[in-house]
Amino acid sequence: MNEFERYTIKNIDFKYPNAYYKLIELGLTDFDIWFFMEEKQATGIFEGMKNRYPDRNLIPFAKRSDNDDTACFELETENKVQLIHDFASSGWEQRGEYEDLWSWLKEAIDTLVDFSRDEEGI
């Protein structure tokens, strides 16, 4: 299994954005609080979200380790990233939207910095 396969859900009709492959190529997949899910975990969440949010076509790719927030692509929104609070009641799951993966990445890094500063007491 190559690195790209490690972080993509198999057997779905979805083309991950080029930025996603770029981050994997650079090894930028773990931001402490946020991390890219490996295929098995992402597939499990994908299947669960299909049941929890049947009106949405969410492709989860990253998870926040301290709560149920999940970053997803959505078929209908092209390259936008949807911030989903998984396990929330249908209709209440949406926590935010980012214009693209790069915008989400900035937020993930800001979260890492803030969390690390809090841990260090800065």
Image (cartoon, grey):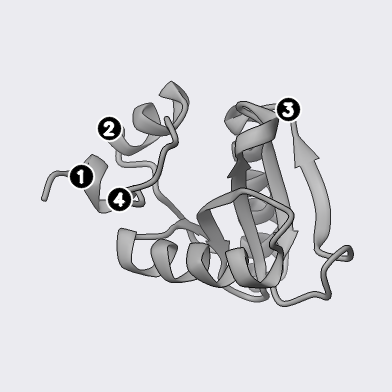
Q: Which residue is mark 3?
A: 99
Q: If you read the primary sequence from the N terminus, does the residue marked by circle 3 or circle 2 appear first?
A: 2
The image shows residue 23 at horizontal and vertical percentages of 39, 34
Q: Which residue is mark 4?
A: 10
Q: CA distance from mark 1 to mark 2?
A: 8 Å
Q: Which residue is mark 1?
A: 3
Q: If you read the primary sequence from the N terminus, does the residue marked by circle 3 or circle 4 appear first?
A: 4
Q: CA distance from mark 1 to mark 4?
A: 13 Å
Q: CA distance from mark 3 to mark 1?
A: 25 Å
**Which SS class for mark 2?**
helix
Does residue 16 appear to the left or right of 89 in the view shown? left
Vertically, is 36 above or below 51?
Answer: above
The image shows residue 89 at horizontal and vertical percentages of 83, 75
**How many other residues sit within 10 Å of disc 1, few (<14), some (14-19) or many (≥20)?**
few
Vertically, is 64 above or below 10?
Answer: below
- Residue type pointed to by label 3: Glu
Q: Nearer the viewer, mark 4 or mark 2?
A: 4
Q: Are marks 4 and 2 in contact (CB under 8 Å)?
A: no
